[in-house]
């Protein structure tokens, strides 16, 4: 029996190194990249540990409330800066050079095919779009910071075979929401999801980025694509590291295989209270759902692909007078690209508010928090009750075109009329 | 540390997410776990926290603790909940619990085995679950004895484990 992508990556990182790993077995594995937090720093101090496993492999940025909205957060960021100095961390991104970590770190070339990554944010499945096995952690960060390794239970793998051509105004987000709707938000629980098939290679790298990012909304431990020319073109000039793309063996053991044909896909909208409650836009539009806020940004849909889609819809139109639209490019690189491409002119003319990169609105922590009885249509990743503010507010998830069309009309609408 | 827990159970459904366990308001206001404990299940079951007694047990449905990687165990522990068992659990929530030294057990079939208010006795090491109220018993596969998560749980969490290793070295 051959191995899946996840099994191969875990095997090459296992300590002691194994030729083959089997789903269900427990083992220790070497971690290639991690991040850091002020909590990790405090624990290192408490334990009296003066050195981290590798100051070159720990990437640091503060993105959740960037820049600090209050003194507590300012103290947190200050601790992180002290950590960077005291432990000689190479890669630290001050505000202005920053981005949401899952946008910034790939841009900086910190993940390559075949890497095993563990970071302290649930959307750390993101790096799967670069053919890496990447999972979220929390307090175990301390273990990784000290030892550069982590325990794993080798996951079972499941395969999504993606076929068909993506219809107009549909992107990776819509495929992911359709999967959540059809198979539930626990379809990938404790498993490695591998997105394969002709559409996986046809789709844009940015759409893959979104699908790996939202893999955790399907419960996944990893959410991996194969590497191809789009991957190597992206990495060119961003990293000097050599790497070997990882593919599954032809006789690899997938616990389950799902065939996803997108030919009849429509832009999808996830209604509250979770991403599995998704509906095609044609159906939802009939309900004429009034909105108060639109949000375009986050590690899920704050990239150029999304901003261009939004600009195409917004050009020549104004945001409805009862609605506000907040746009936050996911990193300063995206911010600069959008500025150069003239997208900001379109956004400003449409009377949208352009912010800097931050996780704030998506996570309900600052900038664009919802009041009670307010409703937001958002490009982000979670629509749990109270996610973006008051527990009496509501979040609908959609792609950037649907958000843009909806903020023009003040109700959730099909963006394809703006095509 | 004991690995057998006996207590009254509270049953919750599928997909109990981290925003329900530790709502954003507790983060925006920078609350301690003790303060945040007042908001556990605030949105889906208002008033519940006032009824919880120390030693009570949570029984979850599928995908318990899904969502963000925030440390949702802290406020639950402050409430006095002794252990959580569920049909299935989000991976991050499960690991957070183990790393914090908080007993959890994945128990497929638990929903049909008990009703709210029953008294359960749960052995985390052996995977034996007794329904004292209904006088019946079920077994689930526990974590293997020699697996890293079982060792972490037995050590009382990852910090206790590291403290043992590093504080000993120092002294």
Image: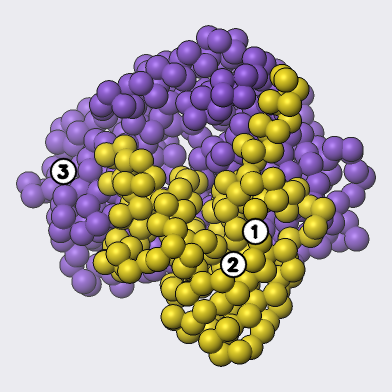
Chain colours: A purple, B yellow
| Residue at image point 56% right, 58% down | B90
Residue B3 percent across, percent down from the top left: 66, 61
For the residues bearing labels 3 and 2, Cβ distance under 8 angstroms: no
User: Dividing the picture into quarters, in which one does residue A290 lie?
Assistant: bottom left
Give SS at disc 3.
strand
What's the mark number on residue B5?
Answer: 2
In which chain is the residue bearing label 1? B
Tell me, yes or no, whether dots 1 and 3 are on the same chain.
no
Question: Looking at the image, is mark 3 or mark 2 nearer the viewer?
Answer: 2
| Residue at image point 36% right, 41% down | B32
* For residue A144, side relative to residue B67 (left or right): right
The residue that mark 3 highlights is A324
User: Dividing the picture into quarters, in which one does residue A339 lie?
Assistant: top left
Q: Nearer the viewer, residue A148 or B115?
A: B115
Residue A70 percent across, percent down from the top left: 25, 26
**Mark 3 and mark 2: Cα distance apart in space:** 51 Å
Q: Vertically, is B138 above or below A258?
A: below
Q: Vertically, is A273 above or below A129?
A: below
For the residues bearing labels 1 and 3, Cβ distance under 8 angstroms: no
The residue that mark 1 highlights is B2
Give SS at disc 1.
loop
Tell me, yes or no, whether dots 1 and 2 are on the same chain.
yes
Structural crowding at the residue carrying mark 1, measured as other residues with C-alpha within 10 Å and reported as few (<14), some (14–19) or many (≥20): few
In which chain is the residue bearing label 2? B
In which chain is the residue bearing label 3? A
């Amino acid at each position: 029996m051959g191995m899946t992508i996840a099994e191969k990556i875990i095997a090459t990182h296992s300590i002691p190194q194994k030729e083959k790993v089997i789903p269900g077995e427990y083992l220790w594995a070497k971690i290639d990249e991690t991040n850091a937090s002020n909590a990790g720093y405090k624990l290192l101090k408490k334990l009296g540990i003066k050195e981290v496993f590798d100051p070159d492999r720990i990437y640091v940025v503060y993105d959740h409330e960037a820049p600090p909205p209050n003194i507590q957060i300012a103290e947190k960021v200050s601790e992180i800066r002290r950590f960077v100095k005291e432990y000689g961390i190479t890669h630290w991104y001050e505000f202005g050079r920053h981005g949401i970590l899952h946008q910034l770190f790939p841009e900086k070339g910190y993940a390559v095919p075949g890497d095993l990554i563990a970071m302290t944010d649930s959307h750390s499945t993101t790096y799967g779009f670069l053919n890496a096995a990447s999972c979220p952690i929390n307090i175990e960060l301390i273990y990784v910071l000290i030892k550069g390794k982590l325990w794993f239970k080798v996951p079972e793998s499941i395969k999504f075979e993606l076929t068909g051509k993506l219809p107009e105004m549909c992107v990776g987000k819509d495929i992911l929401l359709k999967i959540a709707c059809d198979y539930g938000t626990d379809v990938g629980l404790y498993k490695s999801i591998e997105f394969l098939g002709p559409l996986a290679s046809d789709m844009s790298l940015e759409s893959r980025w979104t699908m790996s990012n939202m893999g955790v909304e399907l419960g996944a431990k990893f959410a991996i694509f194969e590497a191809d020319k789009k991957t190597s073109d992206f990495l060119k000039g961003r990293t000097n590291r050599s790497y070997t793309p990882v593919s599954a063996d032809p006789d690899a053991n997938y616990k389950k295989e799902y065939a996803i044909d997108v030919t009849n896909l429509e832009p999808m909208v996830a209604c509250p209270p979770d991403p599995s409650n998704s509906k095609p836009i044609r159906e939802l539009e009939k309900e004429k759902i009034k909105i108060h806020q639109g949000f375009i940004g986050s590690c899920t849909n704050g990239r150029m692909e999304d901003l261009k889609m939004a600009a195409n819809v917004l050009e020549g139109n104004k945001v409805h007078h009862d609605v506000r639209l907040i746009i936050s490019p996911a990193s300063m690189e995206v911010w600069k690209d959008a500025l150069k491409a003239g997208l900001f002119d379109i956004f400003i003319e449409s009377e949208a508010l352009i912010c800097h990169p931050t996780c704030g609105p998506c996570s309900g922590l600052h900038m664009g928090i919802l009041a009670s009885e307010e409703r937001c249509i958002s490009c982000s990743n979670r629509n749990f009750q109270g996610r973006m503010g008051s527990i009496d507010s509501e979040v609908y998830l959609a792609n950037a075109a649907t958000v843009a069309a909806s903020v023009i009309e003040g109700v959730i609408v099909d963006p394809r009329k703006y095509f | 540390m004991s690995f057998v827990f006996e207590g009254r159970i509270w049953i919750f459904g599928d997909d109990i997410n981290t925003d329900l366990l530790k709502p954003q308001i507790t983060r925006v206001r920078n609350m301690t776990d003790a303060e945040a404990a007042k908001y556990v299940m605030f949105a889906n079951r208002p008033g519940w926290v006032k009824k919880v007694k120390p030693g009570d047990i949570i029984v979850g449905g599928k995908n318990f603790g899904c969502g963000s990687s925030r440390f949702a165990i802290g406020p639950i522990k402050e409430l006095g909940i002794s252990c959580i068992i569920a049909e299935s659990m989000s991976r991050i929530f499960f690991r957070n619990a183990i790393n914090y030294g908080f007993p959890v057990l994945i128990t497929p079939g638990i929903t049909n085995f008990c009703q709210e208010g029953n008294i359960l006795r749960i052995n985390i090491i052996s995977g034996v679950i007794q329904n004292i109220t209904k006088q019946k018993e079920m077994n689930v596969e526990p974590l293997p004895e020699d697996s890293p998560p079982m060792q972490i749980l037995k050590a009382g969490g990852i910090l206790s484990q590291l403290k043992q290793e590093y504080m000993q070295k120092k002294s």
